Image: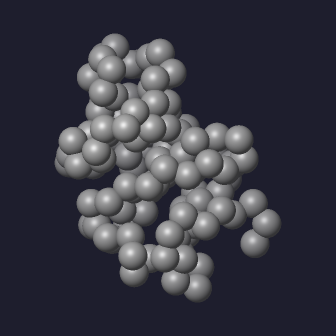
Amino acid sequence: MSGWKDVARADEFRPGEARLVEAGGAMIAVVNLDGRYFAIADACTHDGSPLLGSGIDARDLIEDGRISCPRHGAQFCLRTGAALTPPAWEPVAVFPVRVQDGVVQVRADPGA
């Protein structure tokens, strides 16, 4: 189980919710999209601004499987990390997520 960081109990992490966790020195945004969990680096690739870490409510940043950067409006796919709109062109890193013994966990190794 080494390398996995607990995010939240699955029964307390409802669809549409997002959590910000630190793992392996990285800030990671973990989102529950209709019962499936996805995790991306919490930094816009345009200028490094935080996404969830901006302090803006996740409900105002996440819509239709996308997260918007509150600074310049770039959007990223929560499933793949792909940059969907300018000014960002580079994707954000994605991280593995699993549910183990009823706990949502994220691994700090992108693409592992």
For the point 26% across and 40% down, which residue is it? Answer: 61
Asked if residue 102 lies left or right of residue 108, the reply is left
Which quadrant holds the N terminus?
bottom right
Judge by depth and name the residue closer to the eye, 96 or 103.
Answer: 103
**Measured from the top left, where is residue 12 in percent x and y?**
39, 76
Q: Is residue 85 visible?
A: no
Where residue 101 sits, quadrant-wise, is: bottom right
- Name the image colouring: one colour
In the figure, residue 13 lies in which quadrant?
A: bottom left
Q: Position of residue 20 (x, y in %)?
A: 49, 50
Above or below residue 28? Residue 72 is above
Q: Is residue 66 above or below residue 100?
A: above
Q: Residue at x 72, y 47 (%)?
A: 24
Residue that appears at 27% across and 23% down: 73
In the visual, does 81 lie left or right of 5? left
Left or right of 63 on screen, residue 50? right
> Residue 107: horizontal and vertical position, in percent?
65, 57
In the displayed orientation, state which residue is furthest to the bottom.
101
Where is residue 86 shown, x and y percent of the image? 31, 16
User: How many tags in the picture?
Assistant: 0
Q: Residue pushed farthest right? A: 2
Is residue 81 left or right of 87 when viewed as pictured? Answer: right
Q: Residue at x 44, y 55 (%)?
A: 19
